[in-house]
Image (cartoon, coloured by chain):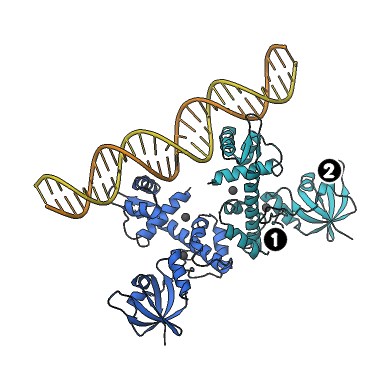
Chain colours: A blue, B cyan, C yellow, D orange
DNA sequence: ATTTATTTTTAGACTAGTCTAAATTTTATT
DNA sequence: AATAAAATTTAGACTAGTCTAAAAATAAAT
């Protein structure tokens, strides 16, 4: 049996190692999980014994294929529940993460596949992140950050890199949501802020914002 | 903070003590929770320290008002999730209990109240058990067991006392569901079996079945 | 190439929850 | 009332997960 704690560690390792490819440091995991490095060492030893991860002392940890499958399954559940909360229970996109953090651990194949069907097989969660299908396949979307968008071009907002509540609320207050059309008017070299047009109003956003907003070019 | 394990013990004590009124034995809890009596003793001590229960050595345990509130809240969540699984995710009534056993521990006021609204404030779960409202108030229904029904009268099936998968599947295979109309044709004194009519077919059910099926008299 | 700083691991302790086996209390039976 | 049986509690041990403090290994700086 896999425990809830093991699942959370595996998910953290997956995310920290850019989707399970790179090796991850003890300290990075400790930071992400809000625990101490010594606790992480104990846990990665256990994950290694259970064949969810490969670990050699002082060398960091990587997920095995088995571990990667667990991670993807949890991410699938997390994102489907987020869609459910927004679409069916009227949660806003800044409220869903915490609850999904718990719902993702409910173990029932039938539950998650029926939920998927009930939601009509969504491809992305409320933050634009892709939802893997039953087989663990992601449908990737081409996207760039606003900071790298071309001045003069028109884009559609398709996701966020930072899904913290404060950032999402900032976007809400500036009428930026998934699907919002954005024209890039000007990039200020001094502070890397970006002037964008939303419908008929223009606003300036900081570099911080520009680095955390994903866009996709709109065909014209 | 209350733990998942504490919640499960509190719920068990509530159910065993006929909805939190009577004192409950250590052994009864151990049996219900599939643990050993010694584990129960440890836990009731802790529940008592945390003011969820009153406990005196060798005297059994009762819930405090605080403990009763916890129990009712978990039962509300359990039953609402059961309705969700049946109504929205096409689970059958014999499949929901196990999953609800886990979902009932998700802690989010907003989640459960929005779920309640989404389901249009159901008053009963798929087994006919009442769902307490936000304030913990139950809407009781008048019901009797088939074993005590009057020969010659017409009833509607409104619930089950045993919601084990095997009993529910038995009812399915005999076309008995919540809402099914049942006429009591004959009670056999020898083995306490009961002959009933369902539409145009008549069947005989054992005493076991007759004791676990709740009915409500149909006005004529 | 040493020394210093940082990262990581170990050692030992703690809590929650569980178990077995023994001791104690209560209840039932003679 | 004494004894036997059943229920309950205690004592001590174990696992999962965590922590602090100290030791060891790696990386950085002189
Ligand atoms: Mn989680
Ligand atoms: Mn998300
Ligand atoms: Mn439960
Ligand atoms: Mn039920």
Name the residue: 55% across, 66% down.
A91
Secondary structure beneath label 1:
loop
Q: Position of residue A14 (x, y in %)?
A: 38, 58
Q: Where, quadrant-wise, is the C terminus of chain A in this rendering?
A: bottom left
Secondary structure beneath label 2:
loop
Name the residue: 89% across, 54% down.
B153
Q: Position of residue B94 (x, y in %)?
A: 66, 54
Please state the total of marks drawn on the protein image.
2
Q: Does the residue labelled 2 lie within 8 Å of ligand 4?
A: no
Q: In which quarter of the image is residue D25?
A: top left
Query: Does residue A165 appear left or right of residue B198 in this picture?
Result: left
Label 1: few (<14), some or many (≥20) within 10 Å? some
Q: Position of residue B43 (x, y in %)?
A: 57, 37
Query: Does residue A53 appear left or right of residue B60 in this picture?
Result: left
**Position of A121 relative to C12 (above/below):** below
Q: Quadrant of residue A64?
A: bottom left
Which residue matches tag 1? B122
Label 2: few (<14), some or many (≥20) within 10 Å? some
Query: Does residue A217 appear left or right of residue B191 in this picture?
Result: left
Which residue matches tag 2? B192
Residue A127 makes an appearance in the image: no
**Position of A127 relative to A49 (above/below):** below
Chain holding disc 1: B
Q: Position of residue A80 (x, y in %)?
A: 51, 64
Q: Nearer the viewer, residue B190 or D30?
A: D30
Q: Earlier in the sequence, mark 2 or mark 1?
A: 1
Look at discs 2 and 1 and give the one toward the viewer. 1
**Position of B156 relative to B22 (above/below):** below
Q: Nearer the viewer, residue A65 or A100?
A: A100
Query: Does residue D11 appear left or right of residue C6 in this picture?
Result: right
**Position of B100 relative to B45 (above/below):** below
Q: Nearer the viewer, residue C21 or B5?
A: B5
């Amino acid at each position: 049996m896999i425990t809830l704690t093991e699942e959370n560690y595996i998910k953290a390792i997956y995310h920290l190692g850019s989707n399970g490819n790179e090796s991850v440091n003890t300290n990075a995991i400790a930071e992400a999980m809000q625990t101490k490095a010594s606790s992480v060492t104990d846990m990665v030893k256990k994950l290694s014994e259970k064949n969810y991860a490969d670990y050699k002392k002082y060398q960091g940890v990587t997920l095995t294929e088995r571990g990667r499958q667990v991670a993807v399954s949890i991410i699938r559940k997390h994102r489907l529940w987020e869609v459910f909360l927004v679409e069916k229970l009227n949660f806003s996109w800044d409220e869903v993460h915490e609850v999904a953090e718990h719902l993702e651990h409910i173990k029932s194949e039938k539950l998650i596949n029926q939920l998927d069907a009930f939601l009509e097989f969504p491809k992305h969660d409320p933050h634009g992140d892709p939802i893997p299908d039953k087989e663990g396949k992601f449908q990737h979307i081409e996207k760039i950050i606003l900071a790298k968008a071309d001045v003069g071009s028109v884009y559609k907002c398709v996701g966020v890199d930072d899904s913290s509540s404060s950032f999402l609320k900032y976007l809400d207050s500036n009428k930026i949501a998934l699907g919002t059309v954005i024209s890039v008017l000007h990039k200020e070299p001094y502070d890397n802020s970006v002037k964008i047009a939303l419908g008929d109003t223009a606003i300036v956003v900081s570099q911080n914002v520009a680095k955390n907003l994903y866009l996709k070019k709109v065909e014209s």
